Amino acid sequence: MRTEVKPIDETYTIRGEKVDVVTSARFDVDSGEQVFDEKLDNQAILSAFDKYRGNHGIISPERIKRVRHSFGLSQRDFATLLGWSATTIATYETGSLPSVANNKILLALETDPDVAQPLYDTSKEAMTERGKAAFEENVGTSGVEQSKKLIEKGINALFTDINYSEFSGYSAFDLKKFSNMVLYFVINVPELTKTKLNKLLFYADFTHFARNTVSISGVSYARLPHGPVPDQYSLLYGAMESADLIVEKEISAGQYDWSYYAPNADFNATLFSKEELAVMRDTLEHFKDMTAKSIAAFSHKEEAWIDNENAELISYDYANSLTILNEG
């Protein structure tokens, strides 16, 4: 069979969106029919994915590899740093599209390697000795001072694409303000667990939005199985721990182990308005005696949790339907 390669127009559907590309295909010279060519077919698919990435600002496999290599990490250690599976990294580096949330993290690491410091501080115990040594050689760990600089500079760039939108409560995310909001609850609730802290922040931000049409912190919230949580909360709390603002402590009682946050800095009330402080006090008063389990169950009654799929960002437009606003 004599064959030739000719350009053709192809349409692929990627994440529900049609992507048109001009690619190459092999044809039978005599019959004019297209014949299978695995290499050309793969190139066509990759071309469509590349176009989709370009249209949506998605990091490419080659750039992901460069980010990983900049830290000197294997796929396994890079995955541990990010709290993902090694399979996730491997598939991203061979062409799979990252989720929206994971893409944001990878782009943030590419733009500002300092973002990796709080992630490292919370994940290093699970990394290999080789991975830890490579990270510290390539990034350095100047401890609290570097992390405080990171707090001052902020991880704000990570949230710029949702600032002043329905997912930020029409505010701009402010890491310093968010950190002090966390400190307020950690100082006032003894042995505050991460689960309960996430819910206190959610109710404070959404209640303030319901009363004043803007959020307090500008943080976005995502729907997870245990209720609404600040988007990228592990990164945010990790930055606070790195900056020595809070410390995570562990408790063992019989066969049960759990952890909680303790404050390591003072709360700065000057960052907040009277209305914001009032909402935070009201939220504290309403939920201070609830356990983490009970406040998680309480949050499952909210339309903000019921109406959204797992990992989806929650619109602040749900604020007016909050259960606590309609009680009694």
Image (cartoon, helix red, strand yellow):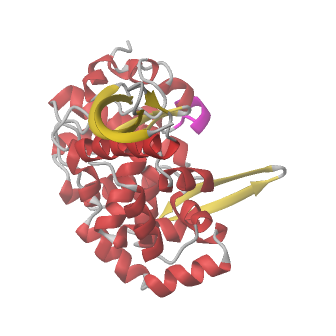
Residue 211: horizontal and vertical position, in percent?
A: 20, 28
Q: Image check: 166 left or right of 321?
A: left
Residue 214 sits in quarter: top left
Q: Residue at x 54, y 55 (%)?
A: 89
Relative to 35, 29 lies left or right: left
Residue 198 among those drawn in magenta: no
Decide: is 66 above or below 98: below
Q: Say whether residue 291 is magenta.
A: yes
Q: Is residue 99 visible?
A: no
Image quarter where the C terminus lies is: top left
Which one is nearer the viewer's eye here, 22 or 297?
Answer: 22
Would residue 89 appear left or right of 46 to someone viewing this image? Answer: right
The magenta-colored residue range is 289-295
Q: Quadrant of residue 53?
A: top left
Image quadrant where residue 245 sits: bottom left
Q: Position of residue 313 (x, y in %)?
A: 36, 34
Identify the residue shown where x is 51% and y is 78%.
72
Image: 124 above or below 314: below
Viewer-closest of 42 and 170: 42
